[in-house]
Amino acid sequence: MSYRIDAKTGELKSLFIEALRPIRETAKSSLSELLEETRKKAAAYTVLPPDGGTVPLVNEVMSSLTTLTGYSGPLASILTSLGDGNWRSKSQSASTTPLDVSPDSQTLFSHFILDMIEALMNSLEARGRATYRSKAVLGVFISNTFCVVDRSIRSSSDLSRYLASPDSIARIDAFRKRGTSAYLEAWRETNQYLLDVQYTSRGGPRPSSSQQTDSAQVVKSLSSKDKDAIKEKFKSFNATFDSLVTQHRQLHMEREVRGALGREVQGVLEPLYGRFHDRYHEIDKGRGKYVKYDKAAFSAQLAALC
C-alpha cells in the first residue's frame, strides 16, 4: 500500500505512514500467527486416518497459499519491512522503515510460502509419528501429504514460480524421501530373508553375471541344517510378503503415491528375490511347498503394487 502512497502523497507521505502504522503492525503479526495457527491445527488432530489418507488441513493450507499469491505485492512489502525470516516470531520489534518493495521481495515471499509448507508438513509428520505404530501406514501418510502439496504447487503457476529454486525443491522433496524411507522400513524384514551370505560361502563362490546358477548343485552342496534354514527363509518370506502386499492394497494412496512406492518396493525386492530364487529354488524340487513364486509370478505381484 505504501508504495502507491509514495507516488501520490509527496510531502504528506510521513503522515500517511504514521496513520497506517497500526494496520502495518497488525499485518506483520498476522504472518507469524498464520504459521502458528497452521502448527496448532495440525497438532489438534487426535485421530488420523487409519489407512494413511491425508487430512483436510493440507488442501486448506495449500488453497490459502494459492490465494495469497494474488496479493504478492503488498505481502512482499510487509515481509521486506520485517526482514527475512522474522515473520517466524511474534517478538520482532516494529520497524520504522517505510514499507518498500525491494528487489529481493520475491525471494522473501518465496521463503514465507516455504515456511508455511514446512510448518504444515513437519507438524503433520510429527502427529503421524506419534499416532501410527505401523511404518507402512506412516510412510503412506507422509507420502500422501507430500503428494497433495506437490500437486497443488504444480497446478498453480504462481506457486510453481515462487518455489522453483533448487533449495525450495530440495526442502519440499525431503518429505517425499522421508515418506518413502518409512514405507520401505516396513519391508526390511522381507528383505532380510533373501540375504544368504552364510550359505553362499559354504556353497562355493557366486557365479558371474554371465553364468547361470545351477540351483540343484547349490542345494546338493548344503548340509541338512542349511537346507532347513533355506526352507524356513522361503516360508517366512512368503508369509511376510503376502501380508505386506495385502496391506499395500488396503492403504489409501494417492495415485502418484501408489505408483512411486510400488516401484520403490519393486526396485529393492525384485533383484534380491531373483538371485535367491536362482540359487535355491530346487529346495523343494518344483513342488511349490516352500517356493511359492517363480520369478515371473513374483514380478507380476510386484508390478501389481503400482
Image (spheres, rainbow, N blue to C red):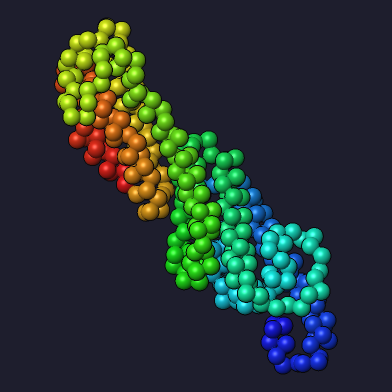
Q: Position of residue 115 (x, y in %)?
A: 62, 59
Q: Is residue 236 left or right of residue 114?
A: left
Near-viewer residue (34 or 11)? 11
Q: Is residue 69 left or right of residue 96?
A: left
Residue at the (80%, 70%) spot, across then down: 95
Q: In this view, does 111 lie above or below 23?
A: above
Residue at the (19%, 11%) spot, across then down: 220
Q: In this view, does 248 lie above or below 217?
A: below
Residue furthest to the top:
224
Residue at the (42%, 37%) spot, across then down: 184
Q: Is residue 238 above or below residue 106?
A: above
Near-viewer residue (27 or 64)? 27
Q: Is residue 216 left or right of residue 254?
A: left
Residue at the (81%, 69%) spot, across then down: 94
Q: Position of residue 254 (x, y in %)?
A: 41, 53
Total number of numbered discs in the rendering: 0
Q: Position of residue 227 (x, y in %)?
A: 27, 12
Near-viewer residue (250 or 219)? 219
Report if residue 242 is visible in the image: no
Report if residue 83 is visible in the image: yes
What is the quadrant of residue 223 in the picture?
Answer: top left
What is the quadrant of the N terminus in the image? bottom right
Q: In this view, does 23 lie above or below 296?
A: below
Q: Where is residue 3 in the image (x, y as percent from the top left)?
A: 69, 84
